[in-house]
């Protein structure tokens, strides 16, 4: 319980202290007009109340990530609590807030444009293709998975095909309609429900007398059954993404930056939403170990129950929260992924529109831009792309690497204290490179399969190369400027 409470205090204190530091480093300007205020278009650039933007952003970036990811990640041991709290404050929240601020200063542009402006046009082109395909994969998975779950919970005549059509049709509407018409009305409700569920679980943890067997007798070492096959570094840092840092978030922050009324609201909305997600992840990590009794027991539960992690979430909710818990469990495993899939499709539309400078005021143009996304998503749903999906977690974290390096260059060019993003950028470069170099063939991700120490050494060399390129680039810019 002590480690849980300390981690919770770190998250709250980090928002109140380090969040202000990051805000001052960037230099917000409350008098500066935001894109939503300077040229609202009634579609994507729509001024919304800060509380509504917060809840939409929270649900956009959360989904099932901080629940499922935290449960799978805490099997590595108590180090998961450190990664969730410190990773959120120094990594994820900084990543989300600064990508949103860059978008605000770039007229609400999407992630590939922001990265390209700092790292060059070739990188922008690669990022555009990479990001859109990643988002389309999210769309496809988060249609078929919830459809299957809904079919299992409803009468036989409501088949998987029926629910697939319903969910996919909803995605199309959420992509085409003005953001305040559907997303702006549904998301705050679901976002609040997700927070209430987490707070209910935390209340049970704090006041029911249940213990959280963190077990620090062996320190923060790896508690996996086979530590050599699943080393703490880098595997845990990819398993727990949405609860610490996730590249997917940088595709969502620009979308909600278009709805912000004032720059002074950016820290509560973007830094705050990530801290809220970190708290949710922390709660579920603690809940999993408290319910199962040990780190190894979590893995045994997931392996021996048909629903895996989803069944564990369902069981915890029903046992601890009763009837309301059952409803919250449905929210967690169905509504949460659906509300990730629709904004993924919308983000893909915005990226393509930004890339080709296509105005989105007309519904016809929105439909034309969305059509290829809809077609490719539909085609992916018809085939087995599980091999590609295995690489999603790694690809997601790789996205955060590019975002952090782009923000670092952005800050350095403006003579700001860029170390707040340089250090996370270097760390995540190490994580992503060592992960793909180490991951053995035949595991969920077919990597190169080198020994973990070799992988860490090689990833360190790659990270130093990136650092040298950054330093050389900055020196050249300063020479040209002088």
Image (cartoon, grey):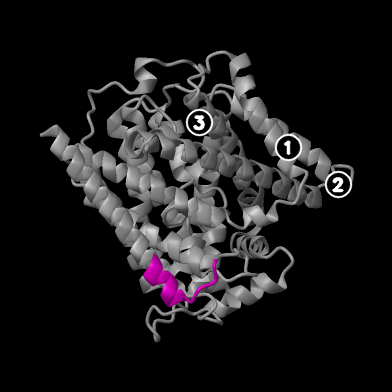
Whole-percent x, y for residue 119 in the image: 35, 40
Decide whether residue 453 is among the magenta residues.
yes
Indicate which label's residue lies in the foreground, 3 or 2: 3
Q: Considering the image in quadrants, where does the C terminus appear?
A: top left
Whether residue 413 is visible: yes
Within 10 angstroms of label 3, few (less than 14), some, or many (20 or more) residues?
Answer: many
Which image quarter holds the N terminus? Answer: bottom left
List the residue tagged with mark 3: 351
What residue is pinned by disc 1?
A: 378
Name the front one of labels 1 and 2: 1
Query: What kind of element bears circle 1?
Result: helix
Could you say whether the residue bearing mark 2 is in a helix, strand or loop?
loop
Percent coordinates x, y for residue 20 in the rendering? 23, 45
Judging depth in this view, the residue of 248 and 215 nearest the camera is 248
Start-end of magenta stretch: 448-458
> How far, Cα to Cα, is label 3 from label 2?
39 Å
As measured in the structure, the alpha-carbon distance from the residue carrying label 1 to the one carrying label 2 is 25 Å
Chain-order first, disc 3 or disc 2? 2
Q: Secondary structure at mark 3?
A: helix
Up-down relation of residue 462 to residue 29 (above or below): below
Residue with the most extreme bottom position = 217
Give the answer, above or below, for where 179 lies relative to 429. above
Determine whether label 3 and label 2 are within 8 Å by CB: no
Q: Earlier in the sequence, mark 1 or mark 2?
A: 2
Give the residue number, with chain letter if any, for mark 2.
155
């Amino acid at each position: 319980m002590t480690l849980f409470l300390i981690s919770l205090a770190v998250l709250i204190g980090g928002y109140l202290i380090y969040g202000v530091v990051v805000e001052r480093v960037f230099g917000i300007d409350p008098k500066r007009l935001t894109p939503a205020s300077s040229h609202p278009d009634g579609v994507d650039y729509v001024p919304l109340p800060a509380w509504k933007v917060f809840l939409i952003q929270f649900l956009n970036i959360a989904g099932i990530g901080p629940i499922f990811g935290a449960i799978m990640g805490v099997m590595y041991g108590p180090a998961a609590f450190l990664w969730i709290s410190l990773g959120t404050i120094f990594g994820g929240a900084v990543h989300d807030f600064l990508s949103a601020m860059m978008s605000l200063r770039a007229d609400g542009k999407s992630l590939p444009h922001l990265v390209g402006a700092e790292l060059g046009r070739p990188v922008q082109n690669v990022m555009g293709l990479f990001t859109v395909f990643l988002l389309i994969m999210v769309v496809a998975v988060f249609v078929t998975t919830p459809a299957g779950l809904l079919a299992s919970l409803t009468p036989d005549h409501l088949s998987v095909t029926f629910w697939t059509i319903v969910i996919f049709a909803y995605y199309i509407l959420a992509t085409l309609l003005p953001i305040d018409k559907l997303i702006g009305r549904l998301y705050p409700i679901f976002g609040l429900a997700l927070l209430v569920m987490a707070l209910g679980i935390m209340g049970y943890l704090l006041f029911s007398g249940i213990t959280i067997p963190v077990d620090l007798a062996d320190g923060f070492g790896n508690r996996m059954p086979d530590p050599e096959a699943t080393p703490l570094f880098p595997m845990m840092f990819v398993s727990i993404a949405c609860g610490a840092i996730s590249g997917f978030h940088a595709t969502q922050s620009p979308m909600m930056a278009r709805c912000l009324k004032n720059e002074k609201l950016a820290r509560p909305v973007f830094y705050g939403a990530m801290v809220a997600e970190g708290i949710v992840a922390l709660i579920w990590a603690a809940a999993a170990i408290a319910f199962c009794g040990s780190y190894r027991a979590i893995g045994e539960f997931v392996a021996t129950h048909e629903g895996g992690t989803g069944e564990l979430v369902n069981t915890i909710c029903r046992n601890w929260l009763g009837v309301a818990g059952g409803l919250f469990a449905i929210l967690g495993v169905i509504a949460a992924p659906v509300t990730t899939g629709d904004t993924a499709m919308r983000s893909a539309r915005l990226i393509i529109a930004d890339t080709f400078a296509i105005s989105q005021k007309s519904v016809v143009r929105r439909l034309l831009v969305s059509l290829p996304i809809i077609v490719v998503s539909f085609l992916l749903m018809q085939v087995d792309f599980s091999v590609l999906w295995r690489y999603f977690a790694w690809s997601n974290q790789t996205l955060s690497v590019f975002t952090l390096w782009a923000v670092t260059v952005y800050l350095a060019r403006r003579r700001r204290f860029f170390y707040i993003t340089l250090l996370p950028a270097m760390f995540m470069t190490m994580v992503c490179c060592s992960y793909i170099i180490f991951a053995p063939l035949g595991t969920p991700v077919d990597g190169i399969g080198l020994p973990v120490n070799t992988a860490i050494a090689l990833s360190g060399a790659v990270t130093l190369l990136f650092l040298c390129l950054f330093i050389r680039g900055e020196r050249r810019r300063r020479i040209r400027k002088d």
